[in-house]
Amino acid sequence: MIEVTEKAATELKTLLEQEGKPELALRIFVAGVACSGVQYGLALDDEVKEDDVTMESNGIKLVMAKDIERSFSEGSIDYIEDENGKGFLIRNPSAGGGCGTCGGCH
């Protein structure tokens, strides 16, 4: 199961409230592939497709395609604020450790 941390859930609920759309789900999607493995993205979505998997964590509805669930069945979505900025962070313990071709993934 994917966990939405309390901090991320609070930020998401605030965002949904500001948008006036509390019924939206958080969609997890494949945003690309890098030397460290599959990169995931997040988007607010009001549509659940027939082949989607849905779950809930900390009051946030999550949606993803079934093929994503196979490679990202456990992990977390967090919200971070540091000297580099703020935003949502996806952690996937199943992600690969890098291919070694770019020299920057250690």
Image (tube, grey):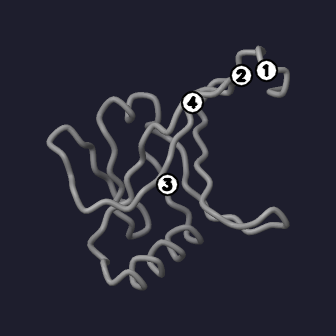
**Gap between marks 4 and 3 measured at Cα:** 14 Å
- SS assignment at label 3: strand
Residue 56 is tagged as none
Tell me which amino acid carries mark 1. Answer: Cys
Tell me which amino acid carries mark 3. Answer: Glu
- Please state which of the two labelled residues, at mark 2 or mark 3, is closer to the viewer: 2
- Are the two marked residues, 1 and 4, in contact with CB atoms closer than 8 angstroms? no
- SS assignment at label 2: loop
The image quadrant where one finds the N terminus is top left
- SS assignment at label 4: loop
**Gap between marks 1 and 4 measured at Cα:** 20 Å
Q: Residues within 10 Å of mark 4 (few under 14, many from 20)?
A: some
- Quarter holding residue 29: top left
Where does label 4 land, which residue?
Answer: 94
- SS assignment at label 1: loop
- Are the two marked residues, 2 and 3, in contact with CB atoms closer than 8 angstroms? no
Residue 102 is tagged as 1
Q: Is residue 55 left or right of residue 81?
A: left
- Placement of 61 over or under 10, stated as above or below: above
Q: Residues within 10 Å of mark 2 (few under 14, many from 20)?
A: some
Residue 18 image point, x, y percent: 42, 85
**Gap between marks 4 and 2 measured at Cα:** 12 Å
Q: Residues within 10 Å of mark 3 (few under 14, many from 20)?
A: many
**Gap between marks 1 and 2 measured at Cα:** 9 Å
- Are the two marked residues, 1 and 2, in contact with CB atoms closer than 8 angstroms? yes
Where does label 3 land, which residue?
Answer: 3
Q: Earlier in the sequence, mark 4 or mark 3?
A: 3
